[in-house]
Amino acid sequence: MKRSNCNFLSPLHRFIQTCLCAGIATLASAAYAAERPAVSTPRATSGDAAIEPDWSQRLTITVGPDRADLVGTNDRVLQAAVDYVARLGGGTVKVLPGNFHLRNAVYLQSKVRLVGSGRETVLIKEPSVKTKLAEDSDWFDQEITLADAAGFEVGDGVCLRAKNPDTGADTVVKRTLVARHDNRFKLDRPLRENFWKLGHATVATLFPILSGEFISDLAVENLTLDGNKEHNDNLDGNYAGCIFLQDCNRITIRGVRARNYNGDGISWQICHDVLVENCVSENHTGLGLHPGSGSQRPIIRNCRLEGNDIGIFFCWGVKYGLAENNQLIGNRVGVSIGHRDTDNLVAGNEILRSRDVGVLFRPERGKDFAGHRNRIENNRIIDSGSTNGVAIDVQGATEAVVLSGNEIEETRQPANRIAVRLGAETKEIQVQRNRIKGFATSVKQLQEPGSR
C-alpha cells in the first residue's frame, strides 16, 4: 500500500505547510468579509443609529411673538420647543421674526435644527448683574448665598468665578438657578469646585446665547445673535460666546449673524466636523471664530469676520481644517495659528486692514508645541498693522509651512513694514510665487542672538 508523501515531510516542511494553509484561510476570510452587501432598503431599527431611511418629513415647531405653535419671546419658550422636538427624535424649530430676550442660554439638542428668519429673528442677551458670594460654598454644595440678590431670578444662567487660594488659578463654573429662598439659590448641578470668600468668589448672569455640550448632528441657521456687550461683563471663549459648543460632533452653523458679545462670537471646543458657512461674526471683544482645543476637521467658508480681536483663532491641536473664501476685515489679527495646530489650509481669503498682523504663527513653547505643516495659499493680505506692521509673521520654532500664491500688498507708505517675517528658529518655510508690493522689506529672516 502506497503511503502519503506527507509522512516523510521534515518538521520544517510541515511548519511551512501549516503556515501556508493558515494564510490562505485568512485571505479567503478577508475576501468574504469585504463582499458584505450594501444596505439598499434601510429601515428604522431599534438601536441602529448608523443606518436610517431618508425621511422626507420630520416634525417642525414654530416659535414666535404670535401665531406660532409656542408663543413667547424668551429663552424658556425657545428651550421648550428644542426639548419637545428632541424628545420625538429630532426635527426643526422654526423661530419666527421678533426680538427674543434671554436670561439663560438656549441649550441645543442632538438632531434638532434651529432655524430663524435671518435679520428679522434676533436673540438678545439681557444685561448682566454681578455680586459677591456672602457665604462659602464647597465643591460638594449645590447652593450659593449672594451678598446682593437684586437682579437675580430663578431660571437665570449664571457664571461663578473665583481664585484658587493655593495656586492663584481661575476657577470658572456655569450653572442655572433653579430654586430660591431670600438670597440663597439652589443650582441645577453641584459645584464640584470650591467657591470661597477668600478666593474673591463672585456670581454673574453670564452665559452663551446658544450652548451645546456632548451632542451631535444638529444645525443652527439664519439667526441673528446679539451679545449686548455694552451691558455685559466679559466671559471668554473657553466658556461662552454667541454660540458655544463643547465636545460635539457634526455641527452645521449656516447663515448666522453673531454680533457684539463681550467675549467670542462662535466658539467650539473639542468639537469635530464643524461647518461654519455664510456667517457673519463681528464686533466682539474676543475672537470672531474660535475652533478650539482638539477640534478636528473644521470648515470655515464664505464668512465675514470683522472688528474682532482675532478673526479666526486656531486654538490647541486643531488639525486638518479648512478656512476658505472668507473676508477678515479690521481685526487686530486676521488669522492666528499656534499650539500643535497642524495640517490646516487657509486659502482664498481676503485679510484686510488688520490692526496688528494679517496672519500670525504663534511662538508657543518650542518645536514640540508649534503649528507645523500648515499652508497659507492664494489669499489677499492688504494693509496689515501700523508703521511696523507685518503681513505674515511666522514665529517660534514653526516648521514646514507653505506660503504660496498670496497677494501681499501695502497701499500706505512702506515705512518699516514687512511682508513676510520668519523667526530665527523657523525651518523649512516655503515662500513661493507670492505677489508682494509696497513694503519696506519683502521677506525678513530673523537671526538668532550672536549669529552673523
Image (cartoon, rainbow, N blue to C red):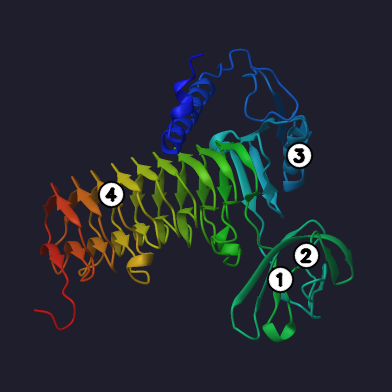
Q: Nearer the viewer, mark 2 or mark 1?
A: 1
**Crowding near the residue tagged with mark 2, few <14, some 14–19, many ≥20 C-alpha atoms within 10 Å:** many
- Vertical placement of residue 305 versus 18, above or below: below
Task: Tell me how far mark 1 sits from mark 4, CA to CA.
Answer: 43 Å
Residue position for label 2: 152
Whichever of labels 2 and 1 marks the residue nearer the N terminus, that label is 2
Give the mark nearest the N terminus, 2 or 4.
2
The residue where tag 4 is placed is 375
Q: Earlier in the sequence, mark 1 or mark 4?
A: 1
- Specify the farthest residue to the front: 1
Q: Is residue 92 left or right of residue 223?
A: right
State the CA–CA distance, disc 1 to disc 3.
27 Å
- Most extreme residue toward the right, as rendered? 181
Question: Compared to 315, does 45 lie above or below?
Answer: above
The residue nearer to you, when weighing 75 against 349, is 349
Please name the residue shown 22% across and 63% down the image: 390
Residue picked out by circle 3: 83
The amino acid on which the numbered mark 4 sits, given as a three-letter code, is: Arg
Looking at the image, which residue is at 57% across and 47% down?
Answer: 225
Pair 3/4: label in front = 4
Q: What amino acid type should be assigned to the residue bearing mark 1?
A: Val
Q: Please name the amino acid that badge 2 sits on.
A: Phe
User: Which is more foreground, mark 3 or mark 2?
Assistant: 3
The residue tagged 1 is 203
Q: Are marks 2 and 1 in contact (CB under 8 Å)?
A: yes
Give the crowd class for mark 1: few <14, some 14-19, many >=20 residues within 10 Å.
Answer: many
**Which of these two is toward me, 93 or 425?**
425
